[in-house]
């Protein structure tokens, strides 16, 4: 949602910024809702009902999905994984589907969306995939609890992320604004469906008011919750290498899960340098995962 009217400066009012922001937001939401309605296709996974479900949004990277499936099978008990694939590369989608089939993991292909043409719109595309999966996987199958994961986050030790929902309605990595608004980063976000005051969620970007993907849920859900309804995950940033500054590249530790965090390496960085850092991060992640005890 655009900022409240009181947050705009006099200069912005003279430039009609409040009206422009509202037009842009309305256009974004209309395109999103039309695409979601057009591609509504509830997935029937009867084994998900009343269970704890982890839903990974995958994107063009079979390697991380293969590793994540292995690590979840090894370290997370009592949860069922589903992969909702948002890949734009058909070869990658086929490879991810094959990996899921071999591992016995449910696979759902997210239909094409309006935001796939530019890498800069990746957050909108991710939000669309989350909204599609919420409607067509979660609400269509009614698990007891559901969590969303980025495809490059890995449980490196035995864990149960749903324990955070023992006394809470929502849990995960919290992103905050200075004015006390907050939202859950949807790469590590968990929901107890029996405790939600609404299931009409919107994981879209709220960039006009300073929030990224998942931020629109402040208006749909989070502002109606009390402190007792939220369990915030532990969080720390770690260096990729001693000679790499963390404003260039970093890893994240979220409730003990290791996040490769590809998009903390700025997409506007010089392409050669960004590619070098991404390759360094991938080598380091794989070395860490392969070194873990079986």
Image: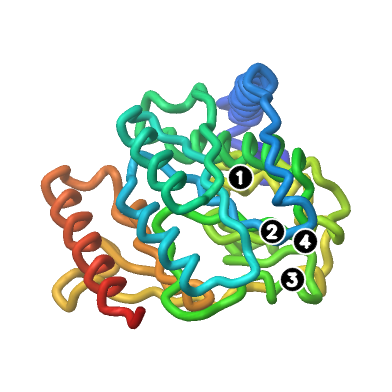
Label 3, on which residue? 165
Label 1, on which residue? 209
Residue 8 appears in the rendering: no
Q: Position of residue 69 (x, y in %)?
A: 44, 58
Residue at screen point 17% across, 62% down: 280
Asked if the residues shown at circle 1 and circle 4 are in contact, with their CB atoms under 8 angstroms apart, the answer is: no
Of the pair 237 and 169, the residue shown nearer to us: 169
Label 4, on which residue? 192
Image vertical order of residue 16 relative to residue 209, above or below = above
Label 2, on which residue? 181
Q: Earlier in the sequence, mark 3 or mark 4?
A: 3
Asked if the residues shown at circle 1 and circle 3 are in contact, with their CB atoms under 8 angstroms apart, the answer is: no
Helix, strand or loop under label 1:
helix
Tell me the quarter of the picture where residue 135 sits: top right
- Badge 2: how crowded within 10 Å, few (<14), some, or many (20+)? some
Asked if the residues shown at circle 3 and circle 4 are in contact, with their CB atoms under 8 angstroms apart, the answer is: yes
Foreground label between 2 and 3: 3
Report the side of 289 relative to 30 (left or right): left
Q: Earlier in the sequence, mark 2 or mark 1?
A: 2
Helix, strand or loop under label 3:
helix
Of the pair 123 and 70, the residue shown nearer to us: 70
Of the pair 141 and 4, the residue shown nearer to us: 141
Q: Earlier in the sequence, mark 2 or mark 3?
A: 3
Asked if the residues shown at circle 2 and circle 1 are in contact, with their CB atoms under 8 angstroms apart, the answer is: yes
The quarter of the rendered structure image containing the C terminus is bottom left
- Between the C-alphas of marks 3 and 4, the distance is 6 Å
Helix, strand or loop under label 2:
loop
Image vertical order of residue 209 relative to residue 226, above or below = above
Q: Earlier in the sequence, mark 1 or mark 4?
A: 4
- Between the C-alphas of marks 1 and 4, the distance is 27 Å
Residue at screen point 30% across, 51% down: 63
């Amino acid at each position: 949602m655009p900022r409240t009217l009181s947050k705009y400066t006099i200069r912005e009012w003279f430039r009609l910024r409040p009206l422009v922001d509202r037009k842009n937001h309305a256009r974004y939401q209309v395109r999103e809702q039309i695409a979601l309605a057009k591609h509504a296709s509830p997935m029937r996974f009867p084994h998900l009902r009343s269970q704890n479900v982890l839903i990974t949004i995958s994107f063009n990277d079979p390697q991380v999905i293969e590793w994540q499936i292995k690590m979840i099978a090894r370290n997370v008990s009592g949860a069922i994984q589903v992969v909702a694939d948002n890949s734009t590369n058909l070869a990658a989608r086929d490879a991810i589907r094959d990996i899921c089939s071999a591992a016995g993991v449910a696979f759902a292909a997210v239909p094409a969306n309006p935001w796939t043409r530019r890498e800069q719109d990746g957050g909108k595309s991710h939000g669309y995939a989350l909204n599609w999966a919420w409607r067509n996987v979660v609400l269509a199958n009614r698990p007891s609890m559901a969590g969303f994961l980025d495809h490059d986050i890995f449980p490196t030790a035995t864990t149960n992320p749903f324990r955070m929902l023992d006394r809470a309605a929502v849990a995960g990595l919290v992103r905050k604004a200075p004015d006390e608004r907050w939202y859950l980063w949807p790469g590590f976000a968990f929901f107890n469906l029996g405790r939600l005051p609404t299931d009409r969620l919107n994981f879209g970007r709220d960039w006009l008011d300073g929030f990224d993907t998942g931020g629109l849920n402040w208006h749909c859900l989070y502002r109606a919750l009390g402190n007792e309804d939220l369990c915030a995950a532990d969080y720390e940033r770690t260096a990729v290498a001693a000679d790499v500054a963390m404003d260039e590249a970093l890893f994240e530790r979220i409730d003990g899960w290791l996040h490769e965090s590809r998009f903390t390496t700025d997409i506007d960085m010089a392409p050669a340098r960004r590619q070098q850092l991404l390759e360094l991060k991938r080598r380091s992640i794989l070395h860490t995962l392969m070194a873990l005890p079986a």
